[in-house]
Image: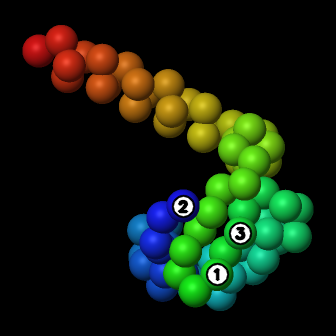
């Protein structure tokens, strides 16, 4: 669980706040997240990851690679 407003999430993703609302509602209806008053709770992480585009896995692997490299310096 972490605090995150729709407005700030929209700024981070470079999308309109309305798009964040629609997406959050869809993920909520699928039982993947709970979203209330600026707090997102991930309920089923594996299903949320599966619902994401293939870029999620690519970004996760690159982040891990870079983090391992930085830790070894």
Q: Where 45 falls versus 9 (above or below)?
A: above
User: Marks 2 and 3, how far apart in space?
Assistant: 9 Å
| Residues tagged 3 and 1 counted as in contact (Cβ below 8 A) | yes
Q: Tell me: 47 left or right of 39.
A: right
Query: Which structural element holds mark 2?
Result: loop
**Among the two numbered marks 2 and 3 on one chain, the one whose residue lies closer to the N terminus:** 2
In this rendered view, identify the residue nearer to me: 31 or 17: 31
Q: Which residue is mark 2?
A: 1
Q: Which residue is mark 1?
A: 36
Measure the C-alpha gap from mark 1 to mark 2: 11 Å
Quarter of the figure with residue 63:
top left
**Front position in the image: 14 or 3:** 3
Binning the other alpha carbons within 10 Å of mark 1 as few (below 14), some (14 to 19) or many (20 upward) gives few
Is tag 1's residue or tag 2's residue first in the polypeptide sequence? Answer: 2
**On-image quarter of the N terminus:** bottom right
Rendered location of residue 8, percent (x, y) = 43, 78
Quarter in which the C terminus is drawn: top left
Q: Position of residue 49 (x, y in %)?
A: 70, 42
Q: Give me the residue at 84% from left, 61% from top.
A: 31
Q: Secondary structure at mark 3?
A: strand
Q: Residues within 10 Å of mark 3 (few under 14, many from 20)?
A: some
Q: Quadrant of residue 15?
A: bottom right
Q: Is residue 26 left or right of residue 10?
A: right
Along the viewing direction, whichever of 53 and 39 lies nearer the viewer = 39
Q: Position of residue 43 (x, y in %)?
A: 72, 54
Disc 3 target residue: 34
């Amino acid at each position: 669980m972490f605090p995150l407003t729709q407005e700030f999430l929209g700024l981070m993703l470079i999308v309109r706040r309305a798009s964040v609302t629609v997406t959050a509602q869809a993920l909520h209806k699928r039982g993947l997240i709970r979203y209330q008053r600026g707090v997102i709770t991930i309920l089923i992480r594996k299903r949320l990851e599966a619902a994401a585009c293939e870029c999620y896995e690519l970004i996760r692997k690159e982040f891990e690679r870079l983090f391992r490299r930085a830790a070894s310096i």
